[in-house]
Amino acid sequence: MLMAVKNNLKLIFSYFILNIKKEWKYKASFFMQLIMMIVNDLFFIIQWVIIFNLVDNIGGYGFNETMLLWGIAAGGYGWCHALFGGAWNIKDIVYDGKLDVYLTQPKSVLLNVCCSSTEIAALGDIAYSFIVLAIIGAPWWWYLIMPFAGILAGLVYVSVYVVFTSLCFYIKRGDAIAKSVEGTLNKSGNYPPAIYNNVVKAIFYTVIPVAFYTFVPAQFMFLTFNIWAVLGAVGFTALWVILAFAMFKMGLKKYNSGNLMGGRL
Amino acid sequence: MKVIEVENLRKEFVSKKRVTKPNGKKSIFKREKSIKNAVDGISFSVEEGEALAFIGPNGAGKSTTIKMLTGILYPTSGDVKVLGLNPSEDRIKLSYQIGSVFGQKEQLWVHLSAYENFKFFGSIYDIKKDVLKARIEELANIFEINDFMHQPVKSLSLGQRMKCEMVASLLHNPKMLFFDEPTIGLDPIAKETLRKLIKKINRELGTTIFFTSHDVGDIEEVCKRVIIINDGKIVLDDSMKNLKYHHLNKKIVEVNLKKNVTIPKKDGITILKAKETLYKIEVDMNKTSMDELLGMFKADDLQDITISSTPLEDIIKDIYRGTNE
């Protein structure tokens, strides 16, 4: 078991290095993507500066707390697109019947597919999650927690996406549902939780786990540290990861290989 | 020892199309199911160290069979055992022991060098660094890729790329190799080189070879046994030697005579072409003998004579068409 975990971590690392090497061949594009993503993220700060000039707080969240949510969201998005960017290719891979190469290799097909691509701009998001901490003058230990919070949020994000995009095995355009859910995660996780009513909160703590993407990590890892809540978040994330693997594995039984010619870029 | 055991293997592909109403319009909601048996109850086995050609026309079920043997597709029914494992249930275990080369699908990343790709495959197959290094060195020498394995894959010729694909599939020292049209698109020299290498892997390393190709030259040179599949069913399973012996019962005789002669009608002798003193005659050796044909000519009248066998390609075409007995 431990050996399998070690080998899979090694695989994730090898893929990441390989993907970076691949992108590094085009250095100008590499840096442009990275810097433009940071600039893009920084623009959102202006919006919140204006809002918090008009109101003191939103549901108890001030500028710093809201920025922390943005930092975790950016980190989560960044980590999952950097390490598991291939998840967003599942739709094309399944529709075009291109899973064959992954299926002939002795690794989890889902992990193999997810790791096969890295979005370079996502590295900008990871960098932004730390820039935010600098902007709000966060204590030093927040910098240590941020990667953990980011990876946890990233695992929630990618697992949710995989669960819904696995519908592609059964229905045409199954990815449209995954895109909608992803949109909800993206748009709702950056705002103070108090603005949502109880029904929405119930959804956010269950089927579309926005809460575990940003709210819970922000509240219980940074603002009021609570080890039990953190362990609960880890457990909940693990459940979504297991669900993602189960959904994908079930879908594989429906997979129809294709005979399109093609290579790996 | 049997390394592949297949019993009554079937694979159905279901497609749905809209039902046409009596008024000629297509229904929006009603769908009609149509089932295509890509592989229709085939059974065969393969011995360790064999080199088997699995051939058939397009859409015959070759690739679908290979995909079920390698764990890519789940069979609809039937039993499959490859190296004692069920490919759909034990896919990961099996992947450590088999390799596959798909001529139409590359597994190498084209922006990276073949060497970088090999190093990556080392982590996919959990190969230790020093073992991997030695293995790359060994295979690079066998496949003669030392000169170009550090170049980006995208800059290699198709032949060089296929050599690298084969090295990548051999890094983990598989007991079996599946080749799905590996020589597709290659020039004759590159094809010849690859065939020799595949033969070498089979004979020197003892690796079992499961080979599909449309190129009869590949099959003739590499394989000792052939299975022909058509419409999802096995239509022939025999050794290459037997295939040639039983199906090469017809000979083509081309004779050039000094003068015109009348060739008497005889069962088993068919005149395919007669132009002045030049005759092209097909002789069915099951019905008549070469002596009988040659006895029809006076030795003094003969200027030139050529006897040849029906090309293997024509025999296979005949079997595909179902016209061969």
Image: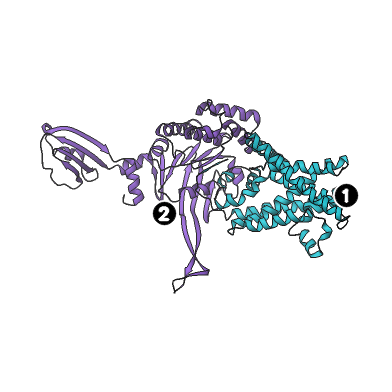
Q: Say if labels 1 and 2 share a chain.
A: no
Q: Nearer the viewer, residue A92 or A1?
A: A92
**Residue B120 placed where, x, y %?**
62, 35
Q: Which disc is residue B231 wearing?
A: 2
Chain A takes which shade in the image?
Answer: cyan
At a point 63% along the width and 53% down the height, the residue shown is A249
Q: Amino acid at mark 1?
A: Leu
**Residue B23 placed where, x, y %?**
44, 74
Residue underneath mark 1: A223
At a point 59% along the width and 40% down the height, the residue shown is B96
> What kind of element bears circle 2?
loop
Count residues near mark 1 (Cα–Cα under 10 Å), then give few for <14, some for 14-19, many for 20+: few
Chain B takes which shade in the image?
Answer: purple
At a point 52% along the width and 32% down the height, the residue shown is B155
Does residue B272 appear anywhere in the picture?
yes
Vertical arrangement, residue B10 with respect to residue A2, above or below: below
What's the CA distance linking mark 1 and mark 2?
67 Å
